[in-house]
Amino acid sequence: MQTPTKLPYKVALEIDIDCEELLDATGLDYTRSEDDDTQNVVWLELDEEDFCDVFETCQLTKANEVEFGTRLLNPELGEYTTKVTVYKPTGDNITFQ
């Protein structure tokens, strides 16, 4: 009997276009935001274990877009992160901005 495949958590990090050169230097793929042309979007897919490592270990009082940008990317890009949206496999969304 096969174990069911777990769907990933999809995470969209919106990052100010002022740091586009830094994004290029890191080699991350990104696209321009459809909603805000001053932002680039980096998409990540996390399995449940990685999601829990990042999102369950952050104190609620410190939870914000910069903290998650730092944890998921790096401290420099975290400073430019303006919005983080998590698309859970259940269909629920979580947004920090």
Image (cartoon, grey):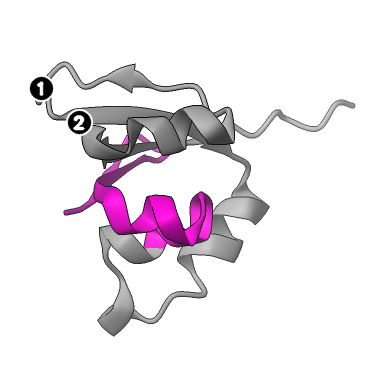
Residue ID at (80%, 32%) = 3
Q: Position of residue 11 (x, y in %)?
A: 41, 38
Q: Secondary structure at mark 1?
A: loop
Q: Nearer the viewer, residue 47 or 16?
A: 16
Q: Residues within 10 Å of mark 2 (few under 14, many from 20)?
A: many
Rendering coords of residue 6 (x, y %): 64, 34
Give the quadrant of the C terminus: bottom left
Where does the image place residue 32, in percent across and percent down from the top left? 26, 18
Residue 75 in the image: above or below residue 41: below
Q: Is residue 27 above or below residue 88?
A: above
Residue 94 shown in magenta: yes
- Mark carried by residue 55: none
Query: Which of the 4 image quadrants contains residue 38?
Result: top left
Q: Where in the figure is residue 34, as x and y percent of width and height?
A: 16, 16
Task: Identify the mark at residue 35; answer none if there is no mark.
Answer: 1
Which element carries disc 2, helix, strand or loop? strand
Figure quadrant of the N terminus:
top right
Badge 1 density bin: few <14, some 14–19, many ≥20, Cα 10 Å: few
- Start-end of magenta stretch: 68-97
- Proximity of marks 1 and 2: CB atoms separated by less than 8 Å: yes
How far is disc 1 from disc 2 in space, using C-alphas? 9 Å
| 1 vs 2, front mark | 2
Q: Which residue is mark 2?
A: 39
For the image shown, how many numbered marks are present on the structure? Answer: 2
- Residue at coordinates 51% horizontally, 49% vertically from top-left? 73
Q: Name the image quarter holding residue 78.
A: bottom left
Badge 2 amino acid: Gln
Side of 37 relative to 40 (left or right): left
- 75 part of magenta stretch: yes
